[in-house]
Amino acid sequence: MLRNPIPATDIAVPKKHTSTSKKRIRKNVWKKKGYWGALKAFSLAKSLSPGDSKSFFVRKINLE
């Protein structure tokens, strides 16, 4: 039975580097995701604050 003297994990393999353009594209997609999430949250907060919400039931408490 033949054995390989060097295990496969010890061989140095050069890694492929991500190109600058691909890196920029991914970064912008990531940033846009956060932007739209923040916009949705702000929009929801604005709709809940005056009490005009149609999809959320908010119980109002009178402090008088």
Image: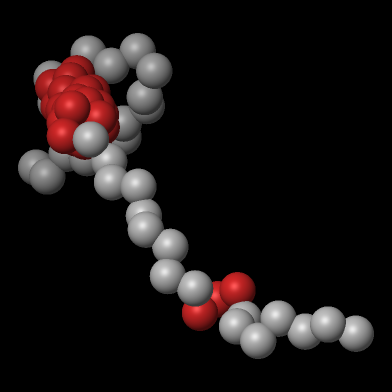
Residue 21 image offset from top left, x and y in percent: 18, 27
Q: Say if 29 sits above or below 19 in the image.
A: above
| Residue drawn 90% across the image and 85% down it | 1
Q: Quadrant of residue 55?
A: top left
Q: Position of residue 12 (x, y in %)?
A: 42, 70
Please indicate whether residue 28 sits to the left or right of residue 15 in the image.
left
Residue 13 picture quarter: bottom left
Side of 35 where 30 appears, left or right: right
Disc count in the image? 0
Tell me where residue 17 appears, x and y as whole percent. 28, 46
Q: Residue furthest right?
A: 1
Q: Is residue 18 above or below residue 38?
A: below
**Nearer the observer, 17 or 43:** 17
Between 35 and 26, which is closer to the camera in this rendering? Answer: 26
Residue at 35%, 13% in the rendered image: 54
Q: Please say which color scheme the image uses.
A: secondary structure
> Is residue 50 among what the camera can see?
yes
Residue at position x 23%, y 35% in the image: 19
Is residue 52 positioned above or below 29 on the image? above
Q: Is residue 37 visible?
A: no
Residue at the far left in the pictured view: 64
Quadrant of the image containing the C terminus: top left
Q: Residue furthest front?
A: 2
Q: Position of residue 32 (x, y in %)?
A: 19, 25
